[in-house]
Image (cartoon, helix red, strand yellow):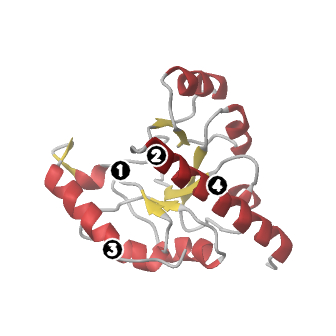
Amino acid sequence: MSVDTESLADAREYFTECANIVLARRHELGRPLLAGVFQNQDPEYVAHVARAVPLDLVQLHGAEAPEAAQLIPVPVIKVFHVDDSFSVDAASIEKRRCHSLILLDTKVAGTEQQGGRGVGFDWSIARRLADRGIPFLMAGGLTPDNVAQAVAVGRPWGVDVSSGIETDKTKDPAKIHAFVKNAKSTTTAC
């Protein structure tokens, strides 16, 4: 499949600008950003919650269409569930003016509840997006033991973790510390 270099350049510029806006907002506030995670919720409800809390970011972690992000008043992280048939060339992943950041997470067969399952995907798939110069976040089966390798292979802009830092379904401070240390030990070019 040929890549439209003008479209790719536009996507690269757009998502890099969005990532820089998110970083600037974090520095402006002087605190971590507060993100709400939603899965298959009505976009108007998500927008209401984002304003009421208020949230700094929203993560759409379900099967929402990328266009749903246009109704939400804060930057949106849109998940794309990765399996062996996933293509970084899919038009929706780089749909500009919709979501602000891309999150790649594992598609778990046989369940509607995605994320937080501790299941990974082939990180070379993420690398193909990095090779296009598009900043993205990566999740899916990440743990303190594998995050450095995942970052080295996938070259994400950031990582997202849930069950990989838990012991008996409770967040484990030692695992969190090890995860952050190991994630920061690897630098990326993206």
Q: Which of 140 and 25 lies nearest the eye of the viewer? A: 25
* Quadrant occupied by the C terminus: bottom right
Marks 1 and 2: CB-CB under 8 Å? yes
Residue 90 lies, in percent from the top left, at 72, 63
Give the Cα distance between marks 4 and 1: 28 Å
- Of the numbered discs 4 and 1, the one sitting upstream in the chain is 4
Label 1 residue SS: loop
The residue that label 2 is drawn on is 114
In the rendered structure, which amino acid carries the disc numbered 2? Gln
Image-based side of 66 in relation to 114, left or right: right
Residues at marks 4 and 1 touching, judged by CB atoms closer than 8 Å: no
Residue 178: % across, % down: 20, 63
Please tell me the numbered disc located at residue 37: none
Is residue 146 visible to us here? Answer: no
Question: Closer to the observer: label 3 or label 1?
Answer: 3
| Residue 86 drawn at (x, y percent) | 61, 65
Residue assigned mark 4: 18
| Mark 4 surroundings within 10 Å by alpha-carbon count, few (fewer than 14), some (14 through 19), many (20 or more) | some
Q: Earlier in the sequence, mark 2 or mark 4?
A: 4
Q: Read off the residue under disc 1.
A: 117
* Residue at the image position 52 percent from the left and 79 percent from the top: 189
Q: Are marks 3 and 1 in contact (CB under 8 Å)?
A: no
Q: Nearer the viewer, mark 3 or mark 4?
A: 4
